[in-house]
Image (cartoon, helix red, strand yellow):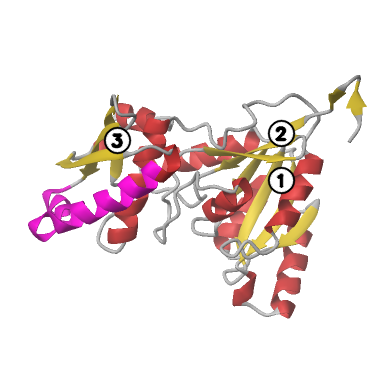
Amino acid sequence: MPEAGNEPVTRCGFVALVGAPNVGKSTLLNQLVGSKVSIVSPKVQTTRSQVRGIAMHGNTQIVFVDTPGIFAPRRRLDRAMVQAAWSGAGDADLIALLIDAKKGLDDEARAIIGKLADIRAKKVLIINKIGTVTRESLLALAAEADRLAKFERIFMIAAVKGDGVPDVLRYFAEAVPAGPYHYPPDEISDLPERLLAAEVTREKLYLRLHEELPYQSTVETDSWKELKDGSVRIEQTIFVGRESQRKIVLGEGGRMIKAISMDARKEIAATIERKVHLFLHVKVREDWENDPERYRAAGLEFPKE
């Protein structure tokens, strides 16, 4: 690698991952970073605010921004999520549009491609879940997408398995501009530990109850206490919109909340590499979607009517 004096030339840049809900952005981000930094769930619209995952490749630092899925907003929370997605795209050095191979260029994908034309950053297309369709369909999809918006490169991957992901990482490492690192080389995310822990619990909540619980449910870390033995005591509150939802989260005899707590505790402990004592509470907070403080806690701008 070329050097300036005795110091290696470093590169650093931001890459925004955009696309419709459930196309695999969070799964791809976790693969690129090599560690879990973004919530993955079968429930759509679970990524709410911008999540930055940081990857090192040689002397290059790539800051990936996992944006909320872009969809037609109906409520205030929806508008805040879509606003966060386009904000992340507009600030990036490169934009990676993910498309689900099976869904192809549906209305959501075409609408996103249309808006990308207004953004100057270089754009690449990543077609995910390639094992779900034939090679002929993939080639036709790539050609049609490239006709609608000229992409610098087109990649075909299976993010869950990691197939094709190293090629994507190498490309971004070469494409971002020269410059100093924005974060320490050993960091993998800019999420504070309290927020990361809340995201882990929210994921476990959705994985257990994604059919029964609306995506508006949220988790907040109320306290984070470092104990003398090196472990951490964490208290969190799960907020739902109605009493009937609170009963679902608790489960019969408290069995559901215990299962969610166990799942979350194990992953939080593995993430922060310390023993964790996790205590979960469930509360009803009606109409929280109109509370500006809740948006700030989730890292979102509170949209005006």
Residue identified by numbered label 3 = 220
What's under tag 2, amino acid-wise? Gly
Is residue 245 shown left or right of residue 195?
left
Give the mark toward the camera: 1 or 3. 3
> Foreground residue, 141 or 76?
141
Q: Is residue 129 above or below residue 133?
A: above
In the rendered image, the quadrant that contains the N terminus is top right
Q: Badges 1 and 3: C-beta atoms under 8 Å apart?
A: no
Q: Badges 2 and 3: C-beta atoms under 8 Å apart?
A: no
The image's mark for residue 303 is none
Mark 1 secondary-structure assignment: loop
Q: Is residue 18 above or below residue 58?
A: below
The first of marks 1 and 3 along the sequence is: 1
The image's mark for residue 13 is 2
Residue drawn 72% across the image and 53% down it: 168
Residue 81 position in % (x across, y down): 45, 41
The reply to whether the magenta stretch includes residue 259 is yes
Residue 92 position in % (x across, y down): 67, 35
In this view of the protein, can residue 118 be seen by the observer?
no
Q: Quadrant of residue 200?
A: top left
Residue 194 position in % (x across, y down): 37, 32
Mark 2 secondary-structure assignment: strand
Magenta span of residues: 242-269
What's under tag 3, amino acid-wise? Glu
Residue identified by numbered label 1 = 117
Residue drawn 70% across the image and 26% down it: 181
